[in-house]
Amino acid sequence: MRSPPHPGTVCLPLSSPIRILVVDDHPFLREGVRAVVETQADMRVVGEADSGADAVVRYRELLPDIVLMDLQLPGLSGDQAIAAIRERSPKARIIVLTTYSGDAHALRACAPGRRGIC
C-alpha cells in the first residue's frame, strides 16, 4: 500500500490501478490522454465516451474510479452528464477538462458544494 499524502487519505494498493473513463468529443484528445495514462503503472483507461449521454451510459457500465470530463460536448453537455452521473452515484469522482479560460460551464461545475479539481 502506498503512503497516504494527507492524514485520513486512503490509497489504493499498487495491485489495483486507478480506473479512468475519458470523456471528450475529440478523438485525438482521448488518444493523447490514453497515451499519457498508459505510461503510469498505477492507472488504466477502462473506457472512452464521445458525448455526455455516452458518458452516463459508460459510467454505469464501467463504474470507474475517476472520470476525466470535457464540458463542451455534443447533445448532453458535460455539466449535464456530471449531474446525471451524480444523481445515481453522488460520490463519483469527476475531473473537469476544458481548454477555455473562464469557461462558464467550468465555473458552474466548480460551484460551491461541488467537489472537484478546477
Image (tube, helix red, strand yellow):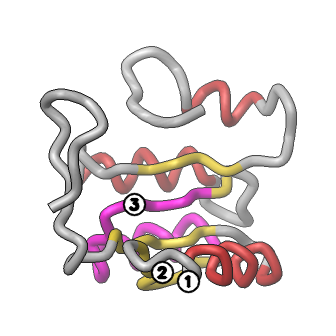
Answer with mark 1 or mark 3, whichever residue precedes in sequence. 1
- Mark 1, residue position: 38
- Mark 2, residue position: 45
Where, by quadrant of the figure, is residue 49 drawn? bottom right
Q: Position of residue 69 (x, y in %)?
A: 58, 57
Q: Identify the mark at residue 85; answer none if there is no mark.
A: none
Q: Nearer the viewer, mark 1 or mark 3?
A: 1
Q: Residues within 10 Å of mark 1 (few under 14, many from 20)?
A: few
- Mark 3, residue position: 66
Q: Nearer the viewer, mark 2 or mark 1?
A: 1
Instruction: Using residue 27 as the reference point, say whether residue 97 is left or right of it.
Output: left
Q: Position of residue 104 (x, y in %)?
A: 75, 28
In this view, 69 is above or below 10 = below
Answer with mark 2 or mark 1, whichever residue precedes in sequence. 1
Look at the numbered discs 2 and 1 and tell me whether their residues touch, using CB distance below 8 Å.
yes
- Of the 4 image quadrants, the one containing the C terminus is top right
- Of the 4 image quadrants, the one containing the N terminus is bottom left
Looking at this view, is 54 or 10 the one in front?
10
Which stretch is magenta?
51-69
Report if residue 55 lies within the magenta region.
yes
Instruction: Using residue 66 as the reference point, say whether residue 110 is left or right of it.
Output: right
Looking at this view, is 76 or 29 the one in front?
29
Looking at this view, is 37 or 104 the one in front?
37
Q: Tell me the amino acid under the disc marked 3.
A: Ile
Q: CA distance from mark 1 to mark 3?
A: 15 Å
Q: Residue at image x 22%, y 57%?
A: 2
Q: Position of residue 34 (x, y in %)?
A: 62, 81
